[in-house]
Amino acid sequence: MIVLGIEGTAWNLSASLVNEDTVLCEASAPYIPIAGGIHPREAAQHFAGSVASVIRQVLRSIDPDLIDGVAFSQGPGLGPCLRIVGTAARVLSLRLNVPLVGVNHCIAHIEVERWNTDLKDPVTLYVSGANSQVLSYRHKRYRILGETLDIGIGNCIDKFARSAGLSHPGGPKVEHLAGTSQNYVPMPYVVKGMDFSFSGLATAAQQTLSSAPVEDVCFSLQETAFSMLVEVTERALSQTKKTDLLLAGGVGANKRLQEMLAIMCEERGAEFFRPKSEYLQDNGAMIAYTGLLMLSHGVKTTIESSAANPNFRPDEVEVQWISG
Ligand code: AMP
Ligand code: MG
């Protein structure tokens, strides 16, 4: 089976062709804001201007008659961006006369890694700009064991970075500055049961800039936020009795977060998987591959039910492609 997938939830517009075994082709047109953070309307305008050429690039690599289905990121994400991608996917599915399938972006991050690594049943820490969730499969669903009560960890770091005069995306710049300090300034540590909150931490870090050097604030922000994530992730491993941890999402590129998770896993005898950076960030292959899994198990999306779903939660999806 060959599936064409289109990702476009926030910043990376990306189309890909995959079969069961490999990525056949991928083309991307990332949106990079000139100033400030991601502006949903500007991102969508960029997507609208680039979607035809990105799709044309992957179509050029294959006889279109060989394509068995079209997958697209249905959510969660920015509504204006999701609508562009959804429209393109509907047109392609009608034009090629093949089924359409709407994919949950969070699940796609997990499935592409299960494909890459042969991981069977991990606990996943998914940390991106807008999302922060701890997920684990049970009885046909990816269950959300813990999640942010307000903003995602990436947004927290990016917001703080903007007020420190650092350009978007702030994550790598904050990581670099944090690496030059060892001075911890107290920050609000907010874990409530299995959930965490980053909004107050972003505000506190912004305010601390007036009384402490920027590198000390970067260091303290990272140590606090990542400790919160590690605490909840460890509890999820303990509760589920699972022994594999998968890291996903753009913030997963952070070396300090990786180090803290690796120490936690080593201490409890768990195995830690950190994906290659091209799969940590959003990509078309993850949507195409998850679409392939869904289509090969009879899951399709009708045109009527293919509307963008900006708050699409992974536990809404019945996971037909895993038995048990
Ligand atoms: P995503 O939403 O999964 O595409 O990830 C984008 C987010 O990852 C943005 O908020 C970035 O600031 C963040 N990010 C990228 N690299 C790093 C890094 N090295 N450390 C922390 N955050 C990062
Ligand atoms: Mg993502």
Image (tube, helix red, strand yellow):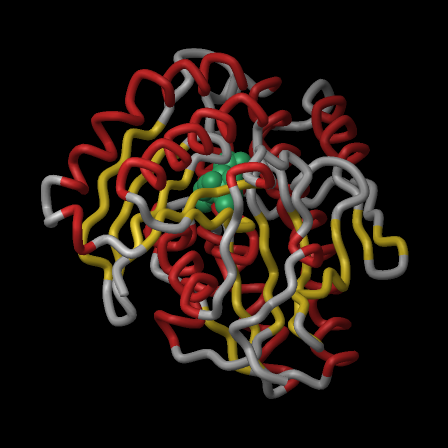
Residue at 27% of width from left, 65% of height from top?
1
Task: Judge whether 65 appears above or below 310 on screen.
Answer: below
Whether 9 is drawn above or below 140: the answer is above
196 and 170: which is toward the camera? 196
**Residue 95: percent from left, percent from top:** 28, 36
Q: Residue furthest right?
A: 193
307 or 81, which is in the foreground? 307
Q: Nearer the viewer, residue 48 or 145?
A: 48
Q: Is residue 168 left or right of residue 163?
A: left
From the top left corner, tell me how far across and down residue 239 is, in percent.
79, 79
Measuring 23% from the left and 66% from the top, which residue is drawn there?
Answer: 22
Residue pictured at 40% horizontal, 50% vertical: 99
**In the visual, does 84 lie left or right of 256?**
left
Residue 295 is at least partly visible in this image: yes
Q: Position of residue 128 (x, y in %)?
A: 56, 44
Q: Quadrant of residue 149?
A: top right
Q: Residue at x 70, y 76 (%)?
A: 138
